Image (cartoon, grey):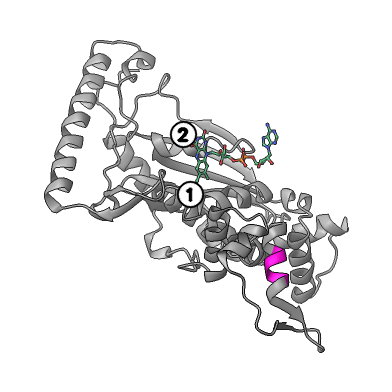
Amino acid sequence: MPETRRPTIPAAEEILGGYFPVLDHGFVALVDYMGGDSDVERAARVSYGAGTRRKSATRGLIRYLRRHRHTTPSEMVEFKFHCAMPMFVARQWIRHRTASVNEYSARYSLLPLLFYRPERGQVETQSATNKQGRDGGVEDVVYREAVGRWERIRAEAGDGYSWLIAEDIAREIARIDLPLSTYTQWYWKIDLHNLLHFLLLRADPHAQWEIREYAKVMAGAVRRVAPLTFEAWMDYQLLGSALSRGELEAIRQLLEVSGDGGLRAKEGATLSVGELAELELAPREIRELAAKLAGPTEVPDFELDLSKMRTAEDVEREIARAVPVHDTR
Ligand SMILES: Cc1cc2nc3c(=O)[nH]c(=O)nc-3n(C[C@H](O)[C@H](O)[C@H](O)COP(=O)(O)OP(=O)(O)OC[C@H]3O[C@@H](n4cnc5c(N)ncnc54)[C@H](O)[C@@H]3O)c2cc1C
């Protein structure tokens, strides 16, 4: 094999084609990538690519681009993933329109009968404060009963599917009653700019825990392919925050620029909830501002655990075992 002249990144090569387990039967694998931080820089400078610049210069430029939302240079870097996820996760994921997707066809192929079973810690009660969230554990007996009910529904659905297939009913019809917990798979290709937008929304604590587990692995891949961009994204976007006019005005009333160009608190300055409301901050915005100032409850590092990485063959064998045996074509 001739040596490639394409830019490669040792940390990315280390995980290329490796399958990282997610949930009970899912995975994320980086199957290909194009470019990295230096390609963001080259695109921004529209350079010939000759010579290597100091890392600090590249870092400075990449941080500047991200701060000022000069995004097209990061569209020059591409990621191709192979992922398997329960259908309800796929349904959230597919809303991101800037990726190229090719999903496993359940019209053409038999579906492996693999279903997501949430672990004990993920089965929580409905959150009282967030209608799209969960909050608070459940009794063991409730979890056991939930698992029992899921198992019965899945056994019935899987049995129905296998029976229809055995009766030579078309796959596109046989699959219609499989539950949303059934795993599907796709190839998903996206550029770095749009991947970071996806991760901003889906690695965020407001996203459902299950899709966040996928986002964590993909963020780990970004960290390896484009570490400087990843660092800037963490600093300015994931762990940073935009401020509204009202929020900025509140901060202006509390802080001022000191003689040496730093910042100092204005003597005796405070703002009551009523005064914040006068700045046209709604009660919810005031709570959100407090949360921004309190800072994140956890700071993820998105480091991938390479000891968990599996081979494609290994994963393929496991999935093939879950396909109904009536595949005669
Ligand atoms: C926590 C959370 C809860 C959600 N709840 C719901 C819900 O209850 N119901 C629901 O239906 N959805 C829900 N969504 C999905 C959400 O509304 C978005 O559809 C999804 O997150 C994709 O975001 P996006 O459009 O920014 O991303 P992408 O589709 O990846 O697009 C990236 C960016 O490209 C641009 N873009 C792409 N396509 C267009 C276009 N056609 N026109 C203009 N600009 C475009 C936009 O700037 C966009 O931000 C939820 C998402 C999250 C993260």
Give the dominant element type of the magenta stretch: helix, strand or loop.
Answer: helix
Q: Is residue 251 magenta?
A: yes
Q: Is residue 171 magenta?
A: no
- Place of residue 256 in the rendered image (x, y in percent of width and height, measured from the top left): 75, 79
Q: In the depicted view, which residue is nearer to us: 114 or 117?
A: 117
User: Nearer the N terminus, badge 2 or badge 1?
Assistant: 1
> Residue at position x 77%, y 69% from top?
58
**From this viewpoint, is residue 7 visible?**
no
Counting the numbered discs, the total is 2
Look at label 2 and name its amino acid: Arg
Specify start and end residues of the magenta stretch as a single range.
248-252
* Image disc number at residue 29: 1
Ligand 1, by image quadrant, is top right
| Nearest to viewer (mark 2 / mark 1) | 2
Q: CA distance from mark 2 to mark 1?
A: 19 Å
Q: In the depicted view, which residue is nearer to us: 4 or 253?
A: 253
**From this viewpoint, is residue 255 visible?**
yes
**Which residue lies under the disc numbered 2?**
91
- Place of residue 183 in the rendered image (x, y in percent of width and height, measured from the top left): 36, 36
Q: Residue furthest left?
A: 141
Does residue 170 appear to the left or right of 240 in the view shown? Answer: left
